[in-house]
Amino acid sequence: MSRKFNRVLLTATALAAATLASGCSGINRLAAIGERPALTAIENPTTQPGYKPVQMPMPRAEPASYNANSLWRNGSRAFFKDQRAHQVGDILTVTVNFTDKANIANETQRSRTNKEDSGITDFAGSKLLTGTAASVLPGRLLTVDSTAASDGKGSVQRQEALQTSVAAVVTQVLPNGNLVVEGKQEIRVNYEVRELIVAGIVRPEDIQSDNTIDSSKIAQARIAYGGRGQISDVQQPRYGQQVLDVLLPF
């Protein structure tokens, strides 16, 4: 009884918290009726809550080598100065070209049938008995039958395509020279804001001479494309429905 009461109390507490949170959010949404969704202020990514510097396995440090009487620097793509991003605060353009298509189908079938039958043909002289006495004595001591069958099918059909460009800022330079970049772009059309976020680690050698890099060459890439506004709000289930989806076991 106590366990059931605790479960009911926990569910009621979760519902109350969700209702309070949805109430505060609802007040903010009511205050913004008829207004365009506000754009996010431009801020330093390294000062945002949850930001953590990237730590990756680094190679052993090696002494730098210089060529005597040489005007050319290793890795440079311009004679006088390398125009590519190479230090914190520099900007480079990330070309997001993501096309993915998958079609997977699996089927598994399993069937098993077992039968066990054991007994004694002449138990305590049962053949000598007649009438009711003969029917009381067991003819078969154990009879077990079991049948099991399972049939599982699954299929995945997915297709995504995203082609765009976004400018990213170098937020960190790793000890081996790789660059940690992060870029965010917001576009507001009428009452809907579209957001594009790109982050990851790039090699300076992969940056093109025009200071661009393809998203496929970004390690630990994090690409997010979404939106917020009236259309996105209508497409989301209500807060109460989301709470029920989490709590209800059936």
Image (tube, rainbow, N blue to C red):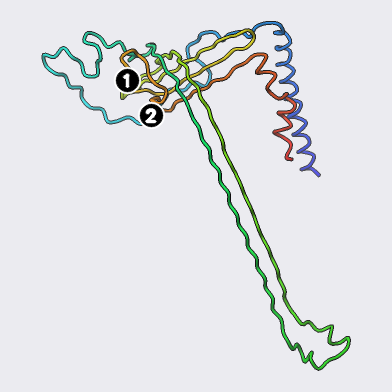
Q: Secondary structure at mark 1?
A: helix
Q: Which residue is mark 1?
A: 204
Question: Residue visible at 21% across and 10% down?
Answer: 79
Number of numbered markers: 2
Specify the quadrant that holds the C terminus.
top right
Question: Residue visible at 67% across and 14% down?
Answer: 230
Q: In this view, which residue lies farthest toward the bottom?
A: 128
Is 160 left or right of 144, judged from the image as shown? left
Res. 46 in view: no
Q: In the rendering, at what x and y percent does residue 55 appear?
A: 40, 27
Q: Are marks 1 and 2 in contact (CB under 8 Å)?
A: no
What amino acid is at disc 2?
A: Met
Residue 129 lies in what quarter of the image? bottom right
Residue 188 lies in what quarter of the image? top right
| Depth order, front residue of 187/38 | 187
Disc 1 crowd rating (10 Å Cα; few below 14, some 14-19, many 20+) is some
- Position of 149 relative to 183 (above/below): below
Residue 43: give its label: none
Question: Residue visible at 40% across and 27% down?
Answer: 219
Q: Which residue is mark 2?
A: 56
Mark in the foreground, 1 or 2: 1
